[in-house]
Amino acid sequence: QIWRDEGHFQEIDGHNIFVHASGTPKYEGHGVLLTHGYPGSSIDWKNVVPRVALHTRIVISDFLGFGQSDKPTDGTFESHYSMFKQADRAVAVAESEGLKEVVLCIHDMGQTVGAEIMARHEEGKLPFKIKHAIILNGSTLVDMVNFMPMQKDMLAAPDTILDKDIPDDQWLDLLNVGFSKEHQANDGLIEVMIAQINEHHGSRLMPRLMRYQNERKENLDRWIGGLTKLSAPTSIFWGQQDPNAAEAMADRLKKLNPAADLHKWPDVSHWPSIEVPERVAKAIIERL
């Protein structure tokens, strides 16, 4: 509730998008733009944001279909939830918050949204400049991904909206496996994450939202290029215990962009912003 009260809603394309923005710009237009993953939301960053906000403006929104943002059930994946559409909205949020030069920090599904934003940067199609990109765990390199059983089931299901919510215990299994042995999630944290999924009956949308994995396959070359051909400096921080986004993905990104600095965290899994928020905040602050 505190996180929600600190944020506001912005109407984009006729939909209400939840935006959390805080901090004073280091200089006019300066700031940090964050993205979140599937099935997470902006609140995954709640322990990173206040640390960074002491130094500059920091902005994150819930993607359409996630967290507190609208979760329309009409249309198709392509009409509402495509990574291209999500990138459009993230850029619109950044522009509305006055960001002109950003440190872009991207995670999981949001890594792919970030890859599209990075590709547009090189095409000269952004209203802001990327000063530095920070890539966290994510499976944009979908040809190397290890899907969990629940993810496989969702991808195999028809593109329909479920008629009832997915039981919480199924989310428990999927979410818990993504935390490291050293940084296990407590019950309260998992309850908050599931509550964000269930807001506006969002779990009924999850099989449709999972189609982003197919879109990754269709646009793999473009998004690999986005992650590895950015003209701005790039840093990679990777939790080595991630069951989905294998460590080899980080090595491949480094090979494709030798100039990138690669940092591996052996005691971290899939959720760096939750497991080690102080480290993630430090990484961002050092690159402001």
Image: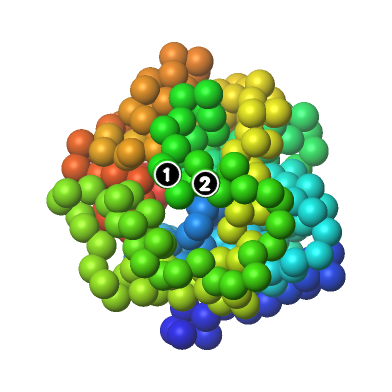
Residue 283 coordinates in the image, percent (x, y):
35, 45
User: What kind of residue is marked 1?
Assistant: Pro
Q: CA distance from mark 2 to mark 1?
A: 6 Å
Residue 46 coordinates in the image, percent (x, y):
40, 67
Determine the residue positioned at 55% across, 71% down: 165
When the figure is inspected, residue 162 is found, relative to residue 105, above or below; the finding is: below
In this rendering, position of residue 48 left or right of residue 26:
left
Task: Identify the coloring.
Answer: rainbow
Residue 164 coordinates in the image, percent (x, y):
59, 72
Compare residues 63 and 31 and report the one nearer the observer: 63
| Residue receiving disc 1 | 149
User: What kind of residue is marked 2?
Assistant: Asp
Contact between labelled residues 1 and 2, with CB atoms less than 8 Å apart: yes
Determine the residue positioned at 70% across, 28% down: 218
When the figure is inspected, residue 95 is found, relative to residue 111, above or below; the finding is: below
| Residue receiving disc 2 | 153
Location of residue 65 by image quarter: bottom right
